């Protein structure tokens, strides 16, 4: 059964479509969430390959919310801590760490984090946190993520106060803007 729109403020059934899931009541101008089934017609643009004159489907991404990005971060930190604890347990049980300096441990942690982010984002376009929240990293140019972009993203994570940059820059962090990437909803 198809449900029709009824404004929660005034009870009117007339509405104006804003997006796939937002409508504005024509009576009282209240904006509500309501999926009318409306889908935007596909858009096309010229191919980025300068040697071919062809049209390709234009992809419009929905940027991931700040809340989902925070959940991604918490899950990734949790997973990374588990990974480090597992490696530490293996090294202690096999007597590999009896004379390792504290600086070596810090270097190991930084290298492990670097490898984790670069590998996961280059291979899958997402980390474990992004798998859970159904988000992914894409290139702003619409092409596949390059290894260079993934390395830049990870290096930018080590910039002091980088974790706060998205709060002042329209929810786009430096590790997004510098390598020309974006974290978006994964529609798959």
Image: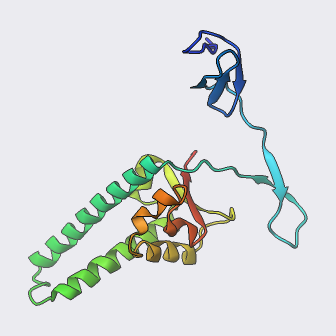
- Which residue occupies the foreground of this view, 31 or 43? 31
Q: According to the image, what is the colour scheme of the structure? A: rainbow
Residue appearing at x 69%, y 49% in the figure: 60
Q: Position of residue 83 (x, y in %)?
A: 26, 66
153 left or right of 139 in image: left
165 left or right of 10 in image: left
Residue appearing at x 72%, y 33% in the figure: 39
- Which quadrant of the figure has residue 82? bottom left
* Above or below: residue 108 compared with residue 60: below
- Which quadrant of the figure has residue 11? top right
- Which residue occupies the foreground of this view, 134 or 152? 152
Q: Position of residue 5 (x, y in %)?
A: 63, 15
Residue appearing at x 57%, y 67% in the figure: 177
* Above or below: residue 177 compared with residue 12: below
* Above or below: residue 106 compared with residue 67: below
- Which residue occupies the foreground of this view, 149 or 54? 149
Residue appearing at x 31%, y 61% in the figure: 77
Q: Position of residue 188 (x, y in %)?
A: 57, 46
- Which quadrant of the figure has residue 52? bottom right
159 left or right of 4 in image: left
Quadrant, the N terminus: top right
155 left or right of 43 in image: left
């Amino acid at each position: 059964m198809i449900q029709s729109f009824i404004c929660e403020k005034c009870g009117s059934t007339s509405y104006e479509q804003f997006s796939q899931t937002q409508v504005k009541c024509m009576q009282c101008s209240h904006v509500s969430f309501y999926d009318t089934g409306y889908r935007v017609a596909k858009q096309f643009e010229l191919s980025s390959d300068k040697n071919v004159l062809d049209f390709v489907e234009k992809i419009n991404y929905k940027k991931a919310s700040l809340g989902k990005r925070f959940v991604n971060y918490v899950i990734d930190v949790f997973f990374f801590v588990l990974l480090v604890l597992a490696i530490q347990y293996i090294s202690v049980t096999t007597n590999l760490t009896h004379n390792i300096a504290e600086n070596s441990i810090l270097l190991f942690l930084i290298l492990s984090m670097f490898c984790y982010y670069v590998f996961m984002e280059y291979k899958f376009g997402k980390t474990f946190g992004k798998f859970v929240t159904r988000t992914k990293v894409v290139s702003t140019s619409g092409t596949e993520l390059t290894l260079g972009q993934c390395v830049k993203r990870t290096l930018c994570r080590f910039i002091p106060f980088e974790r706060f940059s998205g709060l002042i820059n329209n929810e786009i962090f430096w590790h997004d803007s510098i390598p020309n990437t974006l974290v978006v909803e994964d529609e798959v």
